[in-house]
Amino acid sequence: MNFALDASSSYDVATPEGHPEVCRWQAAPHTGAVKPALILLAGETLSLGLSAEEGLLCRLRYSAGLPEISADGLEGELALILPGDGERVLVRMPIRRGEEARVGCVSVELPRAIAGARLSLRCLPGPLNDPAADWLAVHEFIVAPPELHGLARARSFGALRAENERAHFAYAYRHPMYQERFLRASHIDALIPSARSLSLSGACANAFDLAHALLGQRGANDVPDFSLRLQELAKRLGRPPRVLSLCAGTAATEAALLRGANVTVELCLVDIDESLLAAACERDWSGARISVLVQDVNKLDVAEASVDLVICVSGAHHLVELEHVFAQIRTALAPGGELWLIGEQVGPNGNRLDNAALAAANAVFATLPEEFRRNQRTGITDLTLPNQDCAEATFEGIRSDDIEPVLARYFLPIELCRRNVFLWRIVGPDYVLNYDLARADHQRLLEQLVDADLAAAAHGLRLTELHGIYRAFG
């Protein structure tokens, strides 16, 4: 069983006679949530049939559905209804007046041998039985084996996530940081900063790029030389490599890679957005043979042993069906073929920092003068770094936590670069324009931030950026 509640799910809601009608799916903006929640009024019950599978875990995220509930509060109740064995209350979730903005979370292991059972979630009034304004908002309701919870959550609200993601990218890539990088990219090291970028003319034109190039220079781990690797692959094959690029978008990185490597390839660009692929085709590909495939990479279907190299640039953390995609890539690669993950986010889901990394980042951030903490997006000087869950209503970092564990089932690493605890957040799009690289004091500050990030990594804090070269097992 693999169930995640959304508007397309199969479930039942029992409403007592005479109850008012309610719009079942509503936003609960008083909680800060960005996607709609299912609303239950006091006296209503949501029920779900369970399969005979064992080892199921139920996870609930819930809150009050209104910014002010009755004086005696309300209660959510999760119960298991067993055939011929009555009802077993699993957990009660009281919400008191004044706690309406709090989003609670509970996880409950379900008993084994539950064939024919039903799981029920009730909204009940408080102890004084006052149901006025007692609405329960169900933000997340997942029932699945523990190892499949990430997949179940990622599959929910697909249409909403896709719409929000399109809007996000339409806005995000208008940022000067991205526009400048895409325009000047004559080499992959101009787009993916490394120590090599420091000697590449015009490569480090903003604080983000310079800081990450310094990270490669001052740290022990640097980005693989993908241009050199492509040259070696072409030489080994004795013919143009067959390259498949997934989640290609406008293929700025792929074009820069080929220009820097100066090799001819047969390149197939795959993306779900036809307009992005059309823009990619307008680039100067310097003799490379280009084809495009408009396809949702989650549904990838590639012929066996049909490519020598698969590239995915900052794309895997947008994918839901990692298991299928990595299995397809393994099938598609010819003997000796490679998978390259470039600029991948492998931190906590939603492109966040975990608690330890966030605490370390904020300790560094607090030492910065106000001018470097001014958020260019909001116009406000931040006291702490934003750390919102971007996967709440988009595919951004939807299964970042799962990328490396799933990848390890199919591939062996040949060369890896793991780096970047929190540097990307402090000099990211919200703050990058606060730095003037013509000023030596600003450059010295960037060096201090780089050293702080390296120190955090040395203390075992979680690294969030991955660049890797992989080969399939066998």
Image: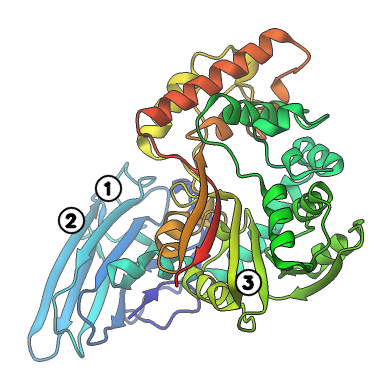
Vertical relation: 229 (above or below) 422 = below
Vertical relation: 67 (above or below) 383 = below
Residue type at mark 2?
Leu
Residue type at mark 3?
Val
- Judging by the rendered image, the residue that carries numbered circle 1 is 71
Circle on res. 128: 2
| 304 left or right of 48 in image | right
Residue type at mark 1?
Ala
User: Quick one: label 3 or label 2, which is nearer the N terminus?
Assistant: 2
Total number of numbered discs in the rendering: 3
**Depth order, front residue of 108/20:** 108
Q: Quadrant of the N terminus?
A: bottom left
- Secondary element at tag 2: loop
The residue positioned 31% from the left and 72% from the top of the image is 143
Neighbor class of circle 3 (other Cα within 10 Å; few <14, some 14-19, many 20+) is many
- Secondary element at tag 1: loop
The answer to whether one can see residue 167 in this image is: yes
Q: Nearer the viewer, mark 1 or mark 3?
A: 3
Neighbor class of circle 1 (other Cα within 10 Å; few <14, some 14-19, many 20+) is some
Residue 191 in percent (x, y) is at 73, 42
User: Quick one: label 2 or label 1, which is nearer the N terminus?
Assistant: 1
- Judging by the rendered image, the residue that carries numbered circle 3 is 297
| 170 left or right of 370 in image | right
Way the structure is coloured: rainbow
Residue 372 in percent (x, y) is at 63, 18
- Secondary element at tag 3: helix
The answer to whether one can see residue 378 in this image is: no
User: Quick one: label 1 or label 3, which is nearer the N terminus?
Assistant: 1
| Distance from Cα at disc 2 to Cα at disc 1 | 9 Å
Vertical relation: 175 (above or below) 164 = above
Circle on res. 416: none
| Distance from Cα at disc 1 to Cα at disc 3 | 50 Å
